[in-house]
Amino acid sequence: MLRFSSLVRFVLTVLPIAVGLLWLNPSLVMASDGQEHVPGALRLEMPAGKKECVKPTEWMRRNHMDFLKHNRDMAVREGVRVTSDSLKNCTTCHTSREKFCDRCHTYAGVAPNCFECHHYPK
Amino acid sequence: MTMATIERRAVLGLGGALAAGVTLAPGITLLAAPAERTEASAGRRWAMLIDSTQCTNSCTACTTACRKENNVPLFGEPSRDVHWIRKVELRDKDQRRPSVQVPVLCNHCENPPCVHVCPTEASFIRKDGIVLVDMHRCIGCRYCIIACPYKARSLVYHETRRTDESNPNVPIRSKGVVEKCTFCVHRLDDGQEPACVEACKKEGKGAMLFGDLNDPRSEIAKRVHTVATKTIRPDLGLKPRVYYQGL
């Protein structure tokens, strides 16, 4: 039999942890508001004269690495080169690598090495 | 050619033109426009024919053009310099024939030993028969360098840097990967000839010919079938796709 006091103790232990985790989770914080006032959310500058990426921003933020990697393998191994989906096409709008790729990657603490070899047009 | 065949061809052509533009729904097309998307075709067999009688000893147009087009690095150390194409002097062992200088590059073999030994499947044969290295997968083990009888592959021993003269369309290579001739695959997919062939036509005597062996109307298919050609070390059974004329 579960005693009432142990139930209360359990709730009192779990509740602060759950609240703490929710507070720490940036995606939930962003989802609740999504505005630039939220501390911790990184806002990138929009390219001049553009409103939308080739895919929705949320989708791109989560999936661009797999998307680019898949396209990379298709281009190298199958010769499938799709102009609109290429990394080169990204650079037609996002003209500054420092403001686009690097800023977010530094924030997220990842270091992809695409541009050790590939050219980012200035 | 009879009228019937002409009509049939015309109809087929019309069908193709229609299919290219068929739109199933707004934004969804049956086939992508050719300029937007390219893909290696299994029906093609890219090959090169080098006429050694037209290749002059002093000319280095092909090697220079290759280096410039593909950002092939020179480290200033002869044992570690990277070469995709190089001029090689071929001598007759019995000295019955004069020696000739011909360009030697990756032969893009049908049975490439480099691909068979690659432990990471970084070296592979593309659908159209071009042997390539996926630099993203290469671990630099150099098995392929040892396996290749043509010495067509080089390891990038040092860091390379992009300069103002570098070709922006071709990536440079990171330290520790193996690289080799790609038949200028980026140019082929763009509908152009390899840089060495173009340079040979412009600056040299047009000793190099490039094309699709599977297309019977192509110049190279006609020449390979009519002129006596040789490949280097045919005894190895690798079936190279770089043919030499006049050796």
Image (cartoon, rainbow, N blue to C red):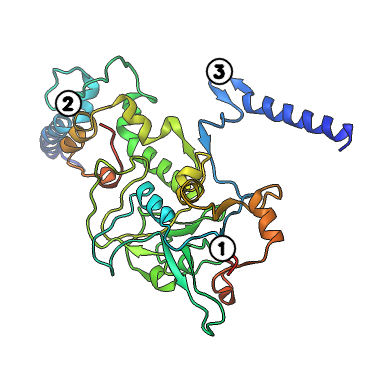
Q: Is residue B201 visible?
A: yes
Which element is circle 3 on?
loop
Residue at x-position 54% and y-position 42%: B39
How packed mark 3 is, by other alpha carbons closer than 10 Å (few <14, some 14-19, many 20 or more), is few
Horizontal side, residue B40 vs residue A13: left or right: right
User: Is A30 rendered above or below residue A4?
Assistant: above
Q: Which residue is drawn at 22% across and 20% down?
A: A32
Q: Position of residue B182 (x, y in %)?
A: 45, 54
Q: Which amino acid does label 1 sit on?
A: Thr
Query: Where is mark 3, residue-wise?
Result: B26
Give residue A42's quadrant in the image: top left
Position of the N terminus of chain A, as image quadrant, is top left
Contact? badges 2 and 1 (CB < 8 Å) = no
The answer to whether residue A63 is left or right of residue B45 is: left
Residue at mark 1: B53
Could you say whether the residue bearing mark 2 is in a helix, strand or loop?
A: loop
Reading the image, the residue beneath label 2 is A41
